[in-house]
Structures are given as C-alpha cells and as structure tokens.
Image (tube, rainbow, N blue to C red):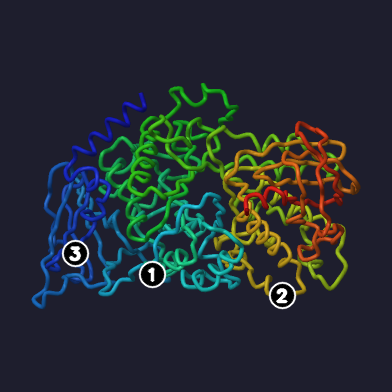
Amino acid sequence: MVALLLQKKLFQLEEAEGGFDQFTRSYRTFGVQRQPDNSLFFKEWAPAAEALFLTGDFNNWNKFSHPYTKKDFGKWELILLPRHDKSPAVDHNTKLKVVVHTKEGERLYRISPWAKYVTREEKSVIYDWVHWDPALPYIQIHPRPKKPTSLRIYEAHVGIASPESTIASYTNFTTNVLPRIKDLGYNCIQLMAIMEHAYYASFGYQVTSFFAASSRYGTPDELKLLIDTAHSMGIMVLLDVVHSHASKNVEDGLNKFDGSDSCFFHSSPRGDHSQWDSRLFNYSSWEVLRFLLSNLRWWMEEYRFDGFRFDGVTSMLYHHHGVGTGFSGDYSEYFGLQVDEDSLVYLMLANHILHTLYPSCITVAEDVSGMPALCREVQEGGLGFDYRLAMAIPDKWIQILKELKDEDWDMGNIIHTLTNRRYGEKCIAYAESHDQALVGDKSLAFWLMDKEMYTNMSSLIPMTPVIDRGLQLHKMIRLLTHSMGGEGYLNFMGNEFGHPEWLDFPREGNNQSYHYARRQFNLLDIDNLRYHQLYAFDRDMNRTEDKYGWLAAPPAFVSAKHEGDKVIVFDRANVLFIFNFHPTKSFQGYRVAVDVPGKYKIKLDSDMVQYGGHGRLDHNTEFFTEAQPFNGRPNSMQVNISFDSTKVIVVELLLNVIKS
C-alpha cells in the first residue's frame, strides 16, 4: 500500500508544472526572487487569506500600497519593478512583512515562510524578515568530499562552541573548532540548531524559519564559508533538519500563517504535539510537500550541506508519536493502523529525491522504535536512510553507571546492546548523547568523576581512585562503543575530552546566564590538566579506525564475554579487541581466540601514559598464534591484560601480505 502511495506521489511530481525538478526547487519561485531585470517577484501560499499585502522599509511601511494578486490553489503573487536607476526596489538587509487580511476581518503581520534571513533586535521578542540579497555573495569553491566508508561524526552546536559566556559565531567555529575536529580524525560534522529558532534554549528543535540560517551566529555567507572550509579539510557537513514538527510561534513562525489553524499543519488536535508543544505538518498536502522537499534542496544547493540527520523520525512514523509506547521488536508494532502512512511516504520521497539528485548524500534517522527497513533503499520498499542512530547504547551506559557496582557489570548484556541491530541496516553508535549533557542529567565523565573533576584533574598530583577509574572507563566505554556498536560513530562536542560541566542555555530559571552554554576548549591548552589525555585517546582511536576500517567491516565476532573475569574479546576488520573491565584484577598469559594466524602487535592501548593510563604493557612485545582452536576460532594466543584497560592488537602478518 505504501509503495503504491509513493509511486503515485512520484508520478504526480513528474506531471506537475515544471516537473519533478521544479517542484523540489520551489525556493526559486516562492518567497522573493530577483529577476534578470532586477524586478522582484514575490510568491506566497495562503489559501485561507482574503487579501495579502507587502510592506516594509521600501515603502515606509505602507500597509496597503502593494497588494498581492490572487492566483489558483491559494497562491498569491506580487511583482516589484526596479527603480528608475534599475536597482531593485527593496534594498539588501532591509526589513519586510507580509500583511494578511483574513475572511474574518483580522489583519495579521507575518514573516514569509520562505524567508532566507531573519533577525531580532536586542530588546525585541519577535524576529524580523530581512531581505538578504548581497551584491557580492560568498561563492563556495571547494568540492564536496567523497562519501567516507567509515563515518565518524562530530556533533556540534555553533553557539556554544567557545569558552566564552556568549553566543559563539560561525567565524569562531571556522577558525577555532574546525582545526580541532580535523585533528581528532572526524570526517563529518553534524551541525545542530542552524535552522532559525526564536527560542535559543530549544537547542534548535523549535524551528520558526525553515529556510533561514540562524542569524544569532552570523550571516549566511559566514555559514557558507564554514562549510566551504570544512570541505577543504575533507570533512562532510550534515544539517540537523527538523521536519517532524514546527514552533507554535505565530508572528515569526509558520503557525497560522494565513490565519487558519491548518495552513501547513493538520488542524487540531491531530496537528498538535502535546509533549513538544509544537505543530505537526500535514504531509498529505501538496503544498506542504513542495515546501519541505524544496527546503531540503535549498540547504543542499545554497549552502552545500552534504546530507541530513532527520530529527524526531519516531514521532513522524506513528500517530501515537512514540508517546507512552514501548517497542519490543514485534512486527505488529510497525505495520498496523498506528503507522502514519503520509509521514512514511514523505520520508521515502525525501530520501529518494536526495539520493537520486545527490548520490553522495548521507541521511541519518533519529528513530528509537526500530522500524524495519528504515535503512534499506526505497527501491527495496525501505525508507531509504543510510543510517539510524543506535539510541539504546547511550541509555545502556548511563543505566549501568547509575545502577550497578563495577563488579556487577553484565558483559553479555553490554554485548547484546551493542550488537542488537537489524542485519543489513547501518547504525551510528555513540556512547552519550547531547541530551545527557543537558542540565538535569550528567555526561559520562560526570557520572564517573563528578565533583572531583573540579579539584583532582591536575597531573601534578597523584590520581585519586575516582579520577583513575573515571579516566580508564571513559576511554574503554568509548572504544567499545566505537568498535562494536555500529557502522558509524558519533561524538557530541566536548565529550571527547570529558567536558567538566553540563549544558544549560540561558533561560528564566538561570537568570538568562550563558555560563553553562559553552564548551571549555581552553582546558585542552593547559598541559597539567588531564583533559588533554582523554582528547589524545579520542584522536588516536579515530586515527586507528581510519587505518584499519572496522566501522566499514562486517559486525564483530565476539569470542569471549567472561562474566567472572569481566573480559570481552572480539575481532573485527582483522583487528583483535581485548577489554578488561575487572575493577581489581590483571591477567597474565590470558588465552584469547584469533582467526588469522601470524604475529600480532599492540596498536592502541588505553593504559598508555599519554592517555592517563599507567603504562603497564610493553608495546615491543610480539604475540604469536598457536594452532590451538579456542572459543570458536581456529587459532589462539596468550596475552597480558591489566585491569581497567583495553588494547587493540593487529595481526602484522596479514598487513604484510596486503602491502606486498
């Protein structure tokens, strides 16, 4: 049924005026466009409006001097001829407003849903539509990087990407953060909170202007420079796109644009998300599809993003939005009447269009439900995403740290959580999410070390037991997640070095303070603090993966998950991983199973001194296999493993064969 609905939509797109291409590039006709003769063409969709007018700085805010002409299907058009000197009638960086007259006699002042730039005066609550049409716009010159086989994502928020207690800028990110991301070995950035949102503390998830890059960080050209610079470093950039819902704001949002309750959204109650206090799109509407699909192409073409992380996919897929619903994996949970077919078809359509037009595009779904075929191609009947977020993994780590003593950790349960994914559907693994960095929760570093992070992180004093345990487990949890949890890896900015504080945006409850709305990268530049040791491990973990490619390899083969020893052993991509989670025991001559015979050497060791470890292992040691079957593998060997540490051992023989 869904496949038939998709085929029908695709056929309608091909038959539409201008065809498939024009329909999905409607940003070139809607909103405001400058024509070759410098006339300005304005086009809006407001089916419930009685009349539309344009006002602004250009006509001294005369509310009635420039009426739109009503067209078919709720569309309105207005042409502003150029001035006598042939310059456009509306100057760059000046304000505009749509005046909507309703059938009930109301007069409403609105921002165009297609506005490409909106700003807010310092003491104002409402955003203003600003005409963005610079004489010399920034032209991006660097080609998009090739799609990596191993995806390592650095999730980032531009506004908090500075130690300063202020809103950081696109320029700051380009100058100060991009080099760190490159050094860390991440090949992709996921930018949060770029689509304009009136409420900063919403983390970007209450979007008000879908085509506008947030002006609180700078200009559109400065964002283009950021992306262009990332491309010059070989780093892809994904946009955290929010098509699952929209802000309820009226004067500077989409809500009630034409005065009705159902312009872009379902009418209430279906059009309201009770938990998020936001509006829900009507994906069956022809013009809503035009708006959203065009929005995707706008970010791909105007800013040259390389793909999207789709927020709130679970909410989109089901009429119940995942609220109060548990997902056990039973197929009846995914294919009943509770599934929103309109949303499902929209996601298939979006992925089909993106991957057809941009073969290197990457799409990631934030879905907690485990919808089958979410990450299979549309041609196969799937939804077409490249990856889904493995959202159960960070929840598992937090549960363990909150509820269990070290000696009670269940190795089998950890392995199950890290490997429990649908075969043939790629996952992005992550040890902790941005949600866990928010005030009211704790990051992994805070769960492990808590208040001692403020007093005992100096390398000039002996490590306390709390700091020692925290540093070692922080590294082990991240590497185990990285190497076993998926086909891609994600880190939220600052977590790579165990950022010492939570994240709290300015709001009434904290007196509008920016003190916690920042990331303290300055701590990395203080040599006698141990944060740089965690940073160094994260960097070398990524660089080791880049060399051996375990993320692009088939799932790991687990040969040991010993509950008594608290030891996990597995191999992936011809790399042997050994984790000792025992809180007190080291092991000498510990036998481990290996697949490929030959000589093995240590390539990454979390116990190395530069990573805040104790340097208990000799890296000059060579390990030779014996033809002794063990734990499901044809060969085995003996190794030494210290407690609270992990090591990655690589078979040298196989590497030599490859090189020759």
Q: Identify the residue position indicated by label 3 in the image.
A: 34
Quadrant of res 125: bottom left
Residue farthest along the left direction in this orientation: 84
The residue closer to the viewer here, 101 or 178, is: 178
Q: Residue at x 65, y 52 (%)?
A: 440
Residue farthest along the front direction in this orientation: 660
Give me the disc on residue 526.
2
Q: Which of the two labelled residues, at mark 1 and mark 3, occupies the earlier sequence position?
A: 3
**Kind of residue at disc 2:** Ile
Contact (Cβ within 8 Å) of mark 1 with mark 3: no
Q: Which of the two labelled residues, at mark 3 and mark 2, occupies the earlier sequence position?
A: 3
Give me the disc on residue 219.
1
Residue at disc 3, secondary structure: strand
Quarter of the picture holding the N terminus = top left
**Kind of residue at disc 3:** Arg
- Mark 3 vs mark 2, CA separation in Å: 52 Å
Q: State whether residue 160 is above or below residue 323.
A: below
Q: Is residue 70 visible?
A: yes
Q: State whether residue 240 is above or below residue 219.
A: above
The residue closer to the viewer here, 547 or 347, is: 547
Q: Nearer the viewer, mark 2 or mark 1?
A: 2
Residue at disc 1, secondary structure: loop
- Mark 2 vs mark 1, CA separation in Å: 33 Å
Q: Is residue 269 visible?
A: no
Q: Which of the two labelled residues, at mark 2 and mark 1, occupies the earlier sequence position?
A: 1
Quadrant of res 514: bottom right
Q: State whether residue 59 is above or below residue 203.
A: below
In percent of width and height, residue 626 lies at: 83, 40
